[in-house]
Amino acid sequence: MDVWWLMRTLPFLALLSPSSSLAASRTEYFEVGKDVHLSCNNVTWTDALYYIWKINITGVQCITSEGVSKPKYNNCTGGKVLRTTMRGESYLHIPSFTLRDEGMYTCETAYRGGAYKAIIRVVATVRPVLIGKLERDGGQLFAVCSAVVRRPEVEVLWKEMWGSLEVKRRLTPNTDGTVTIESWLHLPDDITKDSLTCVANHPSWTQEVSITIDIAEPPADPFAAELQHVIILSSLIVLSVVIITTLSTYMCLQGKNHGK
């Protein structure tokens, strides 16, 4: 395979500039459905000698490489190819990024004056669908905002707090590997607005996800409703007893009158 000429040059190039060999590790987040341009460094082909990308996705490995005056090598699938920017910088192109592209991407490069190795953890992000509702818990009213996400790093926040310090965050693992994040905001008794906004955010997103919750008509307190049912039922029972007692008394009086 043509890639092995690059592999054989690694020890020789390392001896040429041992003091300038650098290595780094980082994590990159990419949104599902978008094209990805993954860079190794900012060295242009004016100084670069070769680039080798070793990609490990769930135990399946592939290699794509290119060097000066040498043909490209690529046994990777999914459209992953090496490209060059207008400035002459090499990068790995991943079209229409999916969950199947998550993995460890290792780039090894040599250039005039040094060598560089980057170990990149590539992670997919999926924008969640937010669900907002009003709930009562322990007699108190809460606005609840929830999102099903793949990782708990997603933040679910409120734009309006009304000075409330009581915000509960709940994480519930799901059987499919996702996590349900809930944010419970305690609402005051004297609500003065008709709506509030919940947002979900992640450092890798360019735009947050938001939802507006209508709070003009909060749900009835179940305890108050139950108490009202008890009062109504008690009143009906008392009324029934009074009616039965009155009828019984009337029947007794009628019986005595007929006996006379």
Image (cartoon, rainbow, N blue to C red):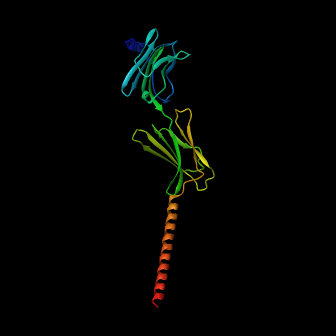
Rendered image quadrant of residue 179: top left
Is residue 162 found left or right of 97 in the rendered image?
right
Q: Position of residue 232 (x, y in %)?
A: 51, 67
Q: Position of residue 260 (x, y in %)?
A: 47, 91
Q: Position of residue 130 (x, y in %)?
A: 52, 41
Judged from this view, the residue extending furthest toward the top is 69
Is residue 217 found left or right of 29 in the rendered image?
right
Q: Measuring 44% from the left and 30% from the top, which residue is drawn there?
A: 99
- For residue 17, say whether it is visible: no
- For residue 141, say whether it is visible: yes
Please tell me which residue lies in front, 138 or 166: 138
When the figure is inspected, residue 226 is found, relative to residue 61, above or below; the finding is below
Q: Measuring 54% from the left and 43% from the top, which residue is drawn there?
A: 157
Please tell me which residue lies in front, 164 or 18: 164
**Could you tell me which quadrant the N terminus lies in?**
top left
Q: Position of residue 129 (x, y in %)?
A: 51, 39
Q: Measuring 45% from the left and 44% from the top, which residue is drawn there?
A: 171
When the figure is inspected, residue 109 is found, relative to residue 194, above or below; the finding is above
Judged from this view, the residue extending furthest toward the bottom is 260
Report the label total. 0
